[in-house]
């Protein structure tokens, strides 16, 4: 295929824009919010339900579950949050990240130059940070969707590429698709980007619903890597938060794989006549929400087990 390299370069370019926008969007929003996000985490995490809601809201605003969970680990390590408070935030972050999938599934990439131009004008031509910082947020949202739009246009010729279609059909195997999703997320360090690429491929009819869901499951596992890295040289309370995140995703994914055919059919029937990209976004939201609902009653038990396995000074078992 003569234009293979052109497709690869355009996909990489679009992915680069997406990752650039995600990282800068998260940093800009954290700077814009200042210490407010940290205060919210402290104020609204007094019980498991408000902690989950807080995790959902802040992750939706920052558009990065990894950023929120890493921030939570840092605050636990600093003693600003307890291990128990962190559990709800971690679960809420897993739901909050699915809202970006719903946005990506909407066909708004073609309008992305509008927020790019508006954000660029207001961020460049004003020295007032109260105006320039929100303008940068608009700019980065525009770049994010333009990156996805670039990838979408780049993969169009692949609809007639037999080798690529054959490769995509192999992802329908749940284990293979999950493995690929985990590896891709490990490589690019963004589950949102992995799910975004899957939805982009689905829009062009290049991946099936089962293949898309399998890769999405793998992305949930791959995203644990950066949060585990954040626990290096942290105290035991923070380490337990990172382990809980890994445990939450591993158990959820294991159940998802065991019930994979049923879950795929359920999403297909529930979504009705929706487009495949919307079905994948729905699967992402329902999967993560179901995982949280499953874990809520288990939180006290999991907390006790982790406290026993990784005891801190205050919860070490007494020596008889």
Image (tube, rainbow, N blue to C red):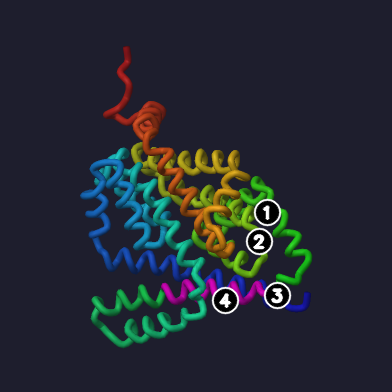
In the rendered image, which residue does mark 2 sit on? 207
Residue at the spot x=65%, y=45% of the render?
175
> Considering only order in the chain, which callout, 2 or 4, is on the residue closer to the N terminus?
4
Crowd class of label 4 (few under 14; some 14 to 19; many from 20; radius 10 Å): many
Left/right placement of residue 177 relative to residue 272 reads: right
From the top left corner, tell me how far across and down residue 252 is, in percent.
Answer: 50, 42
Tell me if label 3 and label 1 are in contact, CB under 8 Å.
Answer: no
**Does the image show residue 177?**
yes
Tell me if label 2 and label 1 are in contact, CB under 8 Å.
Answer: yes
Which numbered disc covers residue 150?
4
- Magenta range: 141-157
Tell me if label 3 and label 4 are in contact, CB under 8 Å.
Answer: no
In the rendered image, which residue does mark 1 sit on? 171
SS for dot 2? loop
> Considering only order in the chain, which callout, 4 or 3, is on the residue closer to the N terminus?
4
Determine if the magenta segment contains residue 71. Answer: no
In the rendered image, which residue does mark 3 sit on? 157
Out of 283 and 100, give the one closest to the viewer. Answer: 283
Determine if the magenta segment contains residue 156. Answer: yes
């Amino acid at each position: 295929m003569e234009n293979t390299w052109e497709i690869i370069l355009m996909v990489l370019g679009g992915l680069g824009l997406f990752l650039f926008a995600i990282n800068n969007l998260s940093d800009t929003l954290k700077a814009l919010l200042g210490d407010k996000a940290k205060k919210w985490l402290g104020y609204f995490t007094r019980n498991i339900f408000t902690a989950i809601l807080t995790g959902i809201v802040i992750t939706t605003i920052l558009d990065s579950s990894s950023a929120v969970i890493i921030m939570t680990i840092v605050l636990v390590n600093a003693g600003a949050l307890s291990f128990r408070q962190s559990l709800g935030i971690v679960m809420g972050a897993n739901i909050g990240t699915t809202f970006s999938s719903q946005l990506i599934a909407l066909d708004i990439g073609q309008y992305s130059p509008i927020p790019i131009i508006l954000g660029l004008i207001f961020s460049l031509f004003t020295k007032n940070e109260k105006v320039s910082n929100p303008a940068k947020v608009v700019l980065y949202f525009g770049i994010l969707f333009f990156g996805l739009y670039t990838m979408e246009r780049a993969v169009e010729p692949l609809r007639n590429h037999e080798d690529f279609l054959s490769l995509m059909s192999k992802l329908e195997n749940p284990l293979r698709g999950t493995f690929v999703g985990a590896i891709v997320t490990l490589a690019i360090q963004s589950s949102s980007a992995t799910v975004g690429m899957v939805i982009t491929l689905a829009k062009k009819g290049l991946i099936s619903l089962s293949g898309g869901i399998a890769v999405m499951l793998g992305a949930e596992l791959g995203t644990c890597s950066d949060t585990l890295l954040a626990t290096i040289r942290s105290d035991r309370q923070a380490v337990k938060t990172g382990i809980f995140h890994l445990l939450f995703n591993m158990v959820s994914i294991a159940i998802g794989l065991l019930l994979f055919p049923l879950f795929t059919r359920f999403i297909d029937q529930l979504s009705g006549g929706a487009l495949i990209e919307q079905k994948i976004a729905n699967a992402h939201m329902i999967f993560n929400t179901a995982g949280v609902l499953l874990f809520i009653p288990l939180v006290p038990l999991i907390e006790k087990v982790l406290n026993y396995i990784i005891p801190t000074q205050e919860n070490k078992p007494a020596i008889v």
